Image (tube, rainbow, N blue to C red):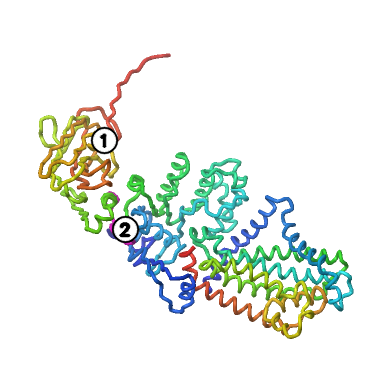
Amino acid sequence: MKRLLLSLWNYRHFIVGSVKNEFRTRFIRSRLGAAWIVLHPLAQVLIYALVLSQVMQAKLPGVDSQYAYPIYLLSGMVVWNLFAELLGRLLTVFIENANLLKKLAFPKLALPLVSIGSSMVNFTLLLLAMYLVFAFLGHFPFRYILWLVPLISITLVLTVGIGLTLGILNVFVRDIGQVLTIVLQFWFWLTPIVYTIDIVPQKYRFLLHLNPLSSIVEGFQSVLVYERSPDILPMLYPALFGLFMLGAGMWLFLRAKEEITDVL
Amino acid sequence: MSFDANMAVLRVESLSKVFRRYSSEWHRIGAIAGLGIKPVEVHRVLQGINFTISRGEAIGIVGRNGAGKSTLLKIITGTLNPSEGFVQIAGRVSAILELGMGFHPDLSGRQNVYHSAGLMGFTPEQIAEKIDEIESFAEIGEYFDEPVRVYSSGMQMRVAFAVATAWRPDILIVDEALSVGDSYFQHKSFKRIREFREMGSSLLIVSHDKAAIQAVCDRAILLEKGQILKDGAPEEVLDYYNALIAVKEEEEEEGIAIEQIRTEDGRIATLSGDMRVKLRKIALYNRKEEEIEIVSVGERVTLKIVIELVEEVDELVLGYMIKDRVGQAVFGTNTFFMERVLLRPEVGRVLEYRFSFDMNLGPGSYSFNTSAHAGSSHVAGNYFWLDNALIFEVVNVDKNGFIGVAWLPPELEIEDVG
C-alpha cells in the first residue's frame, strides 16, 4: 500500500499535466471552450425551472426570494453533476485507456486520479457559475460556505468508491456500463433535486434515505438555499457507505489489477 | 555461457504466464474475489523461462507467431504480471513497442512529448532539459508545435522514437515496430541504438528479420510454445529456427527431428527434414577435378551434391546457399529458380548435381547450406535441410587488393577532360 502511494506520488506531475491537457483540449477545438462545461447543467436547470416552477414554488417555505425554486434546483444539480460525471468517467477509465495500460508500465491508479482531477475542475467552474447566477438572482449564500468542503469530500469518497468498483467490474463485464446509464436515470429521480422531500408521502421517505446521495444533496441545499449549517447525523450514512465502497473498490483493485491487463 | 551475476541487468527466473478462461466473466470476478471458482481453461503462454542479460549484451528473440514473444516482452516491460517466477531488473527499461502510444491528436507534438515522458515517469524539469534534443532528433521542423492530428504516421513515429530514447535506458526493448518510417530515420534510429549499446545499454530485439538479428545481436533465444527451445549464438539459433518453420503442423505430430551436430571446426550444423531424400555428399571441386576447401577470388569451381531418393516424392528441388562468416546470405539458388524441377523421380536412384560458377567473392570464410524440398522454398515440404554443410575459405591470390564480400572487378579509364 505504501509502495502504491509512493509510485502515485512519483506520477503527480503526470496526473496534474493530464488534467491540464484535458482542460486545454476543450479550448482547442471549440469556440466556447470551458463554457460548455457549465452551459449544459445550467440549461437543464433552466428547463426544469420553466416547467416546474409554478408547481414547486409553494413548496419552498422559508426562502424569501421569488426565485427560490431555481436556486433550489441549482444547488442540487451541481452535486448531481459532479456525481454523475465522475461516475461516468470512472466507469470507463480503464477501458478507454486500454492501449496505454497494455503498452506502458505505470501505476494504474493514476488514471482514476486524473478523472477525479478533471471532474473537480469542471465542478469548480460550475460552482462559480452557480454563484454568479445566485448573485444575479439576489441570493448570496456565503455564510456557511466552508461547509461545502466536508460535503464535497463525502461526495468524492462516495462517488470514487462506487465508480472504482464499477470501473473494475466493467473491464470484465461490459454490460455494467449499459446498465448504469439506466440506473442513473432512476437515481436522479430518487434524489430530491427537482422536488423537495416533503412532497413524498411519509411512508416512502425511507426509500429516499436509502439513497446515500439524498443526505448529501440535502446538505448542499441547507448551505446554498436555506443558509443553514447542515445536519451532521444524516451525513454519517453516505460517509460510511462511501468509505465502505472505497475499501471494497481498493480491495478489488489490488486483487484484480493483474487480470485487468490480461483481459483488456 | 557464463554470466557474472553482478553484471546482469535482467534476470528472468522460472517465469510462467497463464491466461485463464472462465465459463462467464462473472466467474472470473468471483475468482478474483476469492470465491474459489475454477477456470474452465488454463492457457499456458509461457512456461519455465530462465535467462539472464548482461550489461551491454544484445539479445534477439525469435519464434513463430503465438510462441509467446510479445507476452514475454510485456512482462519484462511490466505491463503484464507473471503468473509464476519473477523478473529482476537493475535499472530502467524503455520499450519501443509503445511508439506513438497515447498521443493526443489535438495537442501539439511538444505538449505530447511532455505527456508521454510524464507517463514514463519523468518530471517536467527533466523533460524541459531534453525537449530541445527531442525536437532536433525528430526533425519535423515547425510541425513540432502543430497538433499531432495533422502529422503523417512517419512524423508521429519520429516524435515517439525521439521521446522513447531521449533518456538512455539500461535495457532497450525493440519490437518490430522499428521497421516503420523512412530509411533515413531508420538509419538514424539504429545509430542511436548502437550508441546506447556502446554506452552500456542492453538490447532486447524481437524480429522476424533474421538478417537484422544476426547483424546486431550477440545471442539469440528461440521461443516455441512458450518455452525456450534454444539459447545461444545467433547463427546456431537462427538456423534451428529456420528448420523449425519448415516443420508443418501434421509433421509435428509425427515428430520430425531437428538435429544440430558440431562439426570439426566448431561450427554447428543443423539438419532437419523428413529424410525422404538423403544427402550423400557435398563437395567443392576446382578445374582439375580436385576437391578443395580454399578457393582463390574469381576461381572457377564446381559444387557437387549427391543425393539418394529414399522415398517417393512428387517434386524435387535441390538448392544451396552461400553464407558469410556471420551467417548473412550471400547467394542462394535452387533448381526451381533454374527451372530444372524433377517430377516424381524414381525411388532408389542416386543423382549427382553439379553447379559450376566463378567464385566472385571477397576473401573470408563462407559456408554452404543445401536442401532438397518441394516448391520454391523449403517451407512447402522439406526433405532435408543442412546448414553449414560445407565450409570453405576464399583467399586473394592473384587479384589486386579490394574490400567487401563481392568481387566486382571494374575496368578503369581515366581521361583528362578539362
- Residue B268 visible: no
Instruction: Tell me which chain the residue with mark 2 is part of.
Output: B
Q: Amino acid at mark 2?
A: Glu
Q: Position of residue B76 (x, y in %)?
A: 42, 61
Magenta span contains residue B231: yes
Above or below B181: residue A166 = below
On screen, residue B60 versus residue B367, left or right, reads right
On screen, residue B269 versus residue B67, left or right, reads left
Magenta span contains residue B154: no
Q: Position of residue A53 (x, y in %)?
A: 84, 69
Above or below A231: residue A148 = above
- Residue B185 visible: yes
Which residue position is annotated with label 1? Answer: B337
Q: Which residues are magenta?
A: B224-237
Q: Earlier in the sequence, mark 2 or mark 1?
A: 2
Instruction: Tell me which chain the residue with mark 1 is part of.
Output: B
Q: Which mark is residue B224?
A: 2
Name the residue rendered at 39%, 71% in the picture. B40
